[in-house]
């Protein structure tokens, strides 16, 4: 028997009892909808992590001051300023895989404009910072070497600070006060959004590094060149490990550390940290999909149960068909097509329900959801596989009925 006649007979048989057919498909509908929804939520989480990775800047290594031993006590990163601007210049000059190295100083301040104020973080940076973080200005300009040399009182604002101080007004050319020191706003940064730790990256004010040291954050009399961190952008992702080793070796040499001495700095390879977070997000997505797929299996069991009932009810019909010449494979294909048809029809409805449910969940809870073909197609194919797997046994049972016994069945 060809497939099309089998499909026609299967549809006709299913239409005889529409309510039972709908209830049979319900398990598959719920299962596919759950899989599509979970995959959309998982894909949205992955996309969010990827966006946060891009927002931090690609191929980034951070060197932090501190992590030394003093009086038998191990001090953490940032406990003492042990790296300098000269270290940053040496890294950029001597490590061939490094594109730029940007020294940074950071502190908390209150920024005032007119009668409005905002508590935020101020960062003293060099012009290389914008390249290292891949963070261009949306309007105005970034710092120049002249701003650094002259300790210019100029500032570049993050979007959050700009919105809270100026609202919809233009911030360029306005004067703000940081610790009572007037600064002219020369630029506004593009929006970065939250980091992977949930920190608002746009809640910041950038000022020239020299200005931050002399007029805002203060300066270490023992080491006027000291900084809190160095942001290092590596040219190629494949050379991150190599660059990390070379940077560590160069800094230990410059700081005259012996073989038995610990590093007096800490290094963070953001690519590795964020890659592990992305991998964890993917595992969670697969776990969610696997849990949701259980509903599909339950739906498949429902299909097998109903199909077995159907075979029992239609035993006389099967006997008549066998008596007029239908072969076993004809009976097998008819019942198998019925099971697959119910499963695929339920899969299509489940996809529509899953897409709608994903958007509703995203709207209500504010989650990122991403519906894609890669999330829909596996669910639909799995629904078809469930129909074949759980429909085969009832179909085979029907095909093995003996014509005479089937005709005698009441």
Image (tube, rainbow, N blue to C red):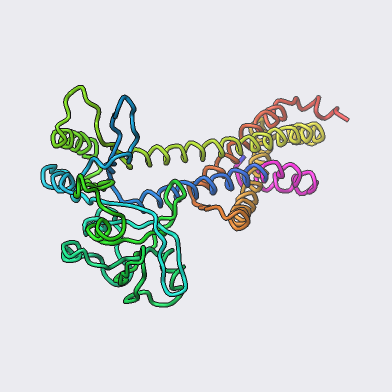
Report x, y in % for residue 20.
Answer: 79, 43
**Horizontal arrangement in the rendering, residue 331 relative to residue 77 (left or right):** right
**Horizontal arrangement in the rendering, residue 401 relative to residue 378 (left or right):** right
Relative height, residue 194 to residue 78 (above, below): below
83 or 178: nearer the viewer: 178
340 or 178: nearer the viewer: 178
**Horizontal arrangement in the rendering, residue 71 relative to residue 338 (left or right):** left
In the rendered image, the quadrant that contains the N terminus is top right
**Horizontal arrangement in the rendering, residue 251 relative to residue 1 (left or right):** left
Relative height, residue 340 to residue 194 (above, below): above
In the rendered image, the quadrant that contains the C terminus is top right
User: Which residue does the image show at 80% across and 26% down from the upper left?
Assistant: 404
Report x, y in % for residue 277.
Answer: 42, 40
User: Which residue does the image show at 60% across and 41% down from the upper left?
Assistant: 383
Relative height, residue 268 to residue 399 (above, below): below
Q: Quadrant of residue 77?
A: top left
**Magenta span:** 2-29
Residue 352 in view: no
196 or 295: nearer the viewer: 196
Relative height, residue 180 to residue 367 (above, below): below
Decide whether the magenta segment is chiefly helix, strand or loop. Answer: helix
């Amino acid at each position: 028997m060809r497939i099309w006649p089998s499909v026609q007979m299967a549809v006709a048989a299913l239409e005889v009892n529409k309510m039972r057919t709908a209830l049979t498909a319900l398990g598959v509908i719920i299962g596919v909808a759950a899989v599509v929804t979970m995959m959309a939520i998982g894909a949205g989480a992955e996309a969010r992590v990827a966006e946060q990775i891009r927002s931090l800047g690609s191929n980034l290594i951070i060197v932090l001051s501190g992590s030394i031993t003093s009086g038998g006590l191990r001090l953490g990163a940032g406990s003492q300023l042990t790296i300098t601007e000269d270290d940053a210049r040496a890294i950029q000059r001597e490590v061939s895989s490094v594109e730029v190295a940007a020294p940074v100083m950071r502190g908390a301040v209150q920024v005032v404009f007119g009668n409005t104020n905002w508590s935020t973080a101020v960062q003293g940076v060099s012009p290389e910072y914008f390249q290292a973080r891949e963070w261009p200005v949306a309007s105005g300009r970034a710092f120049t070497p002249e701003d650094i040399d002259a300790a210019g009182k100029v500032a570049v604002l993050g979007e959050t600070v700009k919105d809270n101080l100026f609202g919809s007004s233009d911030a360029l050319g306005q004067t703000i006060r940081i610790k009572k020191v007037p600064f002219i706003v020369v630029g506004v940064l593009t929006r970065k959004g939250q980091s992977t730790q949930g920190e608002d990256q746009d809640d910041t004010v950038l000022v020239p590094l020299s200005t931050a040291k002399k007029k805002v954050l203060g300066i270490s009399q023992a080491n006027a060149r000291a900084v809190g961190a160095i942001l290092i952008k590596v040219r190629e992702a494949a050379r991150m490990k190599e660059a990390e080793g070379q940077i560590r070796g160069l800094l230990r040499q410059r700081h005259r550390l012996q073989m038995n001495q610990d590093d007096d700095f800490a290094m963070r390879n953001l690519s590795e940290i964020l890659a592990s977070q992305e991998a964890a997000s993917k595992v969670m997505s697969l776990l969610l999909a696997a849990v949701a797929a259980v509903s599909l299996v339950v739906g498949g069991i429902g299909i097998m149960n109903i199909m077995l009932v159907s075979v029992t009810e239609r035993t006389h019909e099967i006997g008549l068909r066998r008596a007029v010449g239908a072969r076993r494979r004809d009976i097998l294909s008819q019942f198998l097509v019925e099971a697959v048809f119910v499963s695929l029809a339920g899969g299509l409805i489940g996809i529509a329900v899953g897409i709608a449910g994903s958007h509703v969940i995203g709207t209500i809870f504010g989650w990122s959801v991403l519906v894609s073909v890669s999330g829909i197609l596996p669910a639909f194919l799995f629904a078809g596989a469930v129909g074949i797997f759980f429909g085969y046994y009832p179909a085979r049972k029907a095909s093995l009925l003996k014509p005479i016994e089937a005709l005698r069945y009441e």
